Image: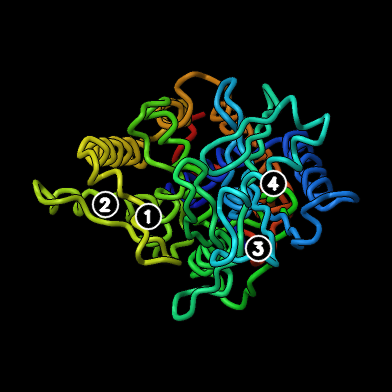
């Protein structure tokens, strides 16, 4: 059980950032609803009478649900769950991509439940649960690649417009992210990346999970739906590549932003860099930077602004000042995620001061005040860098 001390400004800021991440998580209701819907779609695709059954369909999630970096949507936005429908007995050499797409689409169209909420997209079939979330079902075939990381997990997906196969490896990517996230935690073994995981609480998350959550939330605030907002997979990959195993969230974010800022300054007027997919060196996740330089400049502006906000946050003293900067960074519309995190922090801190034997540790629902032990440091009575009496 890892403990978080409260005897330094950095430790206190890490606790606050962790509590913000707790507020960013999907609610139990949101996660359970998405899980039930995901499982039902899988049952339908492989159910009695399904024409897909002979192709041995296997449905598994990809993206932030597997990585554990899903954020609660802002305002009235919907969150998304990406699902792969892998037809295991097919392959890219003997099967037409358009036909595979149409086969999965046809099976979903047979359902009176899914037909009214179904929307064919370029590379997926979207099921829109209006006002809540949408499930993006991606048809796929196996495509084992020798000599590349996690190549045995690689797949191809159809591009409906171009009628071509597109290589990808969501399970391999999840495995790569796991190896990056446990740099600071020895002795952990990789969990299965295929079933939809249970709701991930903060006790399950590493510093890298929280860093990605905060980078994505800051992205959403900074761009507010702008076309130049970087994709989540690009932010996640950059965070994973630049993460050095720090246990401190604030220190790690500062280090990543500093390196990105120096990196941006070194580029100057030369061609923006490529960010290779860790599971496929031929895929440039930052291809938009070269297609339109405004994408890269917008990304650097985002980094510099984020860095400035973090510097102000690390220099701030007094809970009101810290709350104001946190709101500017992560919740300027006042949805309440920062204010609830601040309230929880102040409440638990006060409990610790009054108890004189209370410390902070990670519990089932995030950070909790517990009785002090030699490994759980008690809260000092009047040594708090962020609260004034």
Q: Residue furthest bottom?
A: 147
Question: What distance separates the C-alpha of mark 3 from that of mark 4?
Answer: 23 Å
- Considering only order in the chain, which callout, 4 or 2, is on the residue closer to the N terminus? 4
133 and 370: which one is in front? 133
- Considering only order in the chain, which callout, 1 or 2, is on the residue closer to the N terminus? 1
Residue 101 drawn at (x, y percent): 62, 47
Task: Tell me the number on the disc at residue 104.
Answer: 4
Q: Name the residue under label 3.
A: 193
Look at the picture and state if 281 lies above or below 226.
below
Side of 223 where 59 appears, left or right: right
Q: Do the residues bearing badges 2 and 1 touch, measured as CB atoms within 8 Å?
A: yes
Side of 90 where 239 appears, left or right: left
- Considering only order in the chain, which callout, 3 or 1, is on the residue closer to the N terminus? 3
User: Which dot, 1 or 3, sits closer to the camera?
Assistant: 3
Look at the picture and state if 131 lies above or below 297.
above
Q: Residue furthest left?
A: 269
Question: What distance separates the C-alpha of mark 1 from that of mark 4?
Answer: 33 Å
Q: Quadrant of residue 82?
A: top right
Name the residue rendered at 22%, 48% in the picture: 261
Q: Quadrant of residue 94?
A: bottom right
Residue 185 drawn at (x, y percent): 56, 70
Name the residue rendered at 50%, 67% in the picture: 176
- Considering only order in the chain, which callout, 2 or 3, is on the residue closer to the N terminus? 3
Of the 4 image quadrants, the one containing the N terminus is: bottom right
Name the residue rendered at 64%, 52% in the picture: 84
User: Which dot, 3 or 2, sits closer to the camera?
Assistant: 3
Q: What element carries label 2?
A: helix
Q: Name the residue under label 2.
A: 260
96 and 144: which one is in front? 96
């Amino acid at each position: 059980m890892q403990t978080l001390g409260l005897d330094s400004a950095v430790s206190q800021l890490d606790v606050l950032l962790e509590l913000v991440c707790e507020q960013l998580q999907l609610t139990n209701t949101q996660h359970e609803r998405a899980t039930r819907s995901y499982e039902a779609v899988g049952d339908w695709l492989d159910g009695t009478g399904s024409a897909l059954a002979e192709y041995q369909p296997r449905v598994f999630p990809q993206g932030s649900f597997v990585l554990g970096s899903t954020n609660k949507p802002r305002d009235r936005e919907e969150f998304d769950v990406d699902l792969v429908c892998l037809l295991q007995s097919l392959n890219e050499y003997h099967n037409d991509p358009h036909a595979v797409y149409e086969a999965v689409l046809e099976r979903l169209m047979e359902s009176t439940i899914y037909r009214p909420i179904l929307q064919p997209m370029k590379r997926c079939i979207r099921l829109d649960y209006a006002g809540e979330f949408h499930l993006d079902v991606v048809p796929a075939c196996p495509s084992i690649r020798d000599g590349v990381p996690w190549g045995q997990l690689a797949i191809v997906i159809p591009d409906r417009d171009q009628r071509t196969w597109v290589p990808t490896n969501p399970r391999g990517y999840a495995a790569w992210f796991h190896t990056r996230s446990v740099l600071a935690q020895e002795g952990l073994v990789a969990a299965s990346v295929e079933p939809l995981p249970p709701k991930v609480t903060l006790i399950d998350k590493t510093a890298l999970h929280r860093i990605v959550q905060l980078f994505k939330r800051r992205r959403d605030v900074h761009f507010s739906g702008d076309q130049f907002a970087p994709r989540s997979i690009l932010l996640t990959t950059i965070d994973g590549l630049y993460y050095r195993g720090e246990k401190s969230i604030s220190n790690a974010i500062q280090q990543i932003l500093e390196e990105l800022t120096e990196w941006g300054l070194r580029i100057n007027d030369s061609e923006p860099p490529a960010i290779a997919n860790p599971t496929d060196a031929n895929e440039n996740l930052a291809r938009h930077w070269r297609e339109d330089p405004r994408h890269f400049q917008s990304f650097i502006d985002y980094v510099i602004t984020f860095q400035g906000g973090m510097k102000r946050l690390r220099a701030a003293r007094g809970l009101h000042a810290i709350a104001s900067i946190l709101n500017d960074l992560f919740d300027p519309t006042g949805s309440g995620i920062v204010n609830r995190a601040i309230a929880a922090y102040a409440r638990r801190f006060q409990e610790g001061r009054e108890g004189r034997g209370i410390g902070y540790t990670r519990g089932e629902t995030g950070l909790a005040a517990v009785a002090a032990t030699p490994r759980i440091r008690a809260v000092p009575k009047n040594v708090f860098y962020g609260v004034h009496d």
